[in-house]
Amino acid sequence: MELVVFLDATVVNIALPSIGAALRLDEAGLSWVTNAYLLAFGGCMLIGGRAADLLGPRRVFTFGLALFTAASTVAGLSGAAWLLVAARAVQGIAAAVTVPAQLALLTRAFTEPAARRRAFAVWGAMGAAGAAIGTTVGGLLTQGLGWQSIFLVNLPVGALALALTGRLLPADPPRRPGTRGRLDLPGAVLGTTGLLLLGYAIGAIADAGTRAAAAVMLAVALVLLTGFAVAETRAAEPLMPLRLFRIRQVTGSAVVNALIGAAHVPAFALLALYLQNVQHYGPTRSGLALLPVALAGLVAARTVIPAANQRFGARALLAAGLALQAAALTWLAMLPSTVNYLVDVLPAALLLGVGLPASFVGVTAPAVTSVHPDDAGVTAGIVNTAQRIGSGLGVTAALVLASAVTGSAGYLAGLRAGFAAAAVLALTGCVLTLALLRTGTPTRRRRATRPRSGRTTSGPATSTPARPRPPSG
């Protein structure tokens, strides 16, 4: 399911011209076919994460999977533009519900360290593969079966996954005594609305025609998110418990994951523009050119990544993944006007293929395994929301920079500048990984308890008290 969720973020790009012709949509309208999915995906993930914690990850995963499958069917049968955009938004909501539940299920299902490392490696590879092969699958399906098939293909996949859910996934644990299991409704409204407006503003600010409106929406989003933070300090069952940010692994993972999104998502967009607009590749050929990213990721997930995670730990794996991304993006920043694919593109694609799943595993596992299992869903939501926000900022920044450089130095120079900026972001993430996650990765923390003094504390889940630090000097 992870592959399908991330594939749907990119598979539609190749089909946009066909969708526009069929539904009479201009470029502005077509942008909503993509943005409706991405905005709902990023904006609703906190709700999805908390719902998994309160209601049980298997129950929430099953609901999200059924909703995603139904929305995909509606999208494939849409005969009107408004219905397609609405179905894409529901797909995004379903994805936002499903992803945190997936990570919570992985944490519960794989308790043995080696098995958990392998599971997270495969999960990371699926996300990277989905992002990489989206253009390939989109091109093949659109050319062979029509644009509707890129959505309808999710129907048999979703039906099979639903049939296997009860057999393969662990049952939800009984609800802990004393918990009310209520959703923080004010926090949900403030947080989700703020994130949706933030995502829209980030995407619209790059367009001079919508820049003023985007600035207003950005200001409103910041006000709402500030109100959300205040509301969370007062809520009995907060949507996003702020105490989680006291854990270095959670805060560090969120910051670094934002940089991962800001670096790798623009890279795929820029590379597609280079192959199609500079080298005049067709959509299918352009998609096939990115296929080595997915293949390398799948191989690495079964071999190199679990072994490296076991020997060196998640922090080193994350730093190495980001370093590989930085190297690949630096390579792409030197693309020539006439390409030799085997020399100019393939090495970078292979580096991205290994670096992306290594980063996804390294950035996610420390966060979700450093908290109590009852907080795994919302923690996954926090970390993945950070990547969605970073992706929007990265795409906007890369395209604005590329456009600015194009005006003075030419189209290819603009693309090179975008790749170089993405490389800097990946390298920054590598440095921050070494700085913010330097304390290591505890395997589990107790849920915050409320002692008699009324202050909230949290600590490592071990029966041995922490050894006091000797006085300095």
Image (cartoon, grey):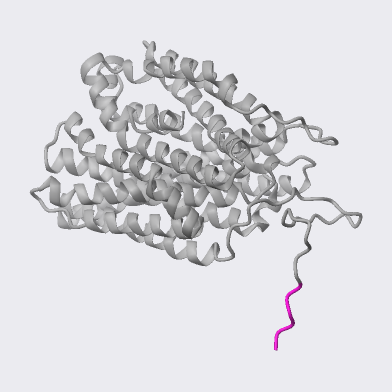
Q: Position of residue 267 (x, y in %)?
A: 30, 47
Quadrant assignment, res 322? bottom left
Residue drawn at the location 63% of the way across and 56% of the way down: 442
Q: Position of residue 306 (x, y in %)?
A: 45, 48
> Magenta stretch: residue 229 in it?
no
Quadrant assignment, res 130? top left
Residue drawn at the location 61% of the way across and 45% of the way down: 379
What's the magenta region? 468-473
Q: Is residue 48 left or right of residue 257?
A: right
**Looking at the image, can residue 145 be seen?**
yes
Residue drawn at the location 64% of the way across and 24% of the way down: 59
> Magenta stretch: residue 472 in it?
yes
Q: Is residue 350 above or below residue 469?
A: above
**Looking at the image, can residue 82 be seen?**
no
Q: Is residue 472 above or below residue 462?
A: below
Q: Residue furthest left?
A: 338
Q: Is residue 190 left or right of residue 99?
A: right
Q: Is residue 133 above or below residue 444?
A: above
Q: Residue furthest right?
A: 452
Residue drawn at the location 71% of the way across and 49% of the way down: 230
Q: Position of residue 392 (x, y in %)?
A: 42, 44
Q: Position of residue 412 (x, y in %)?
A: 16, 51
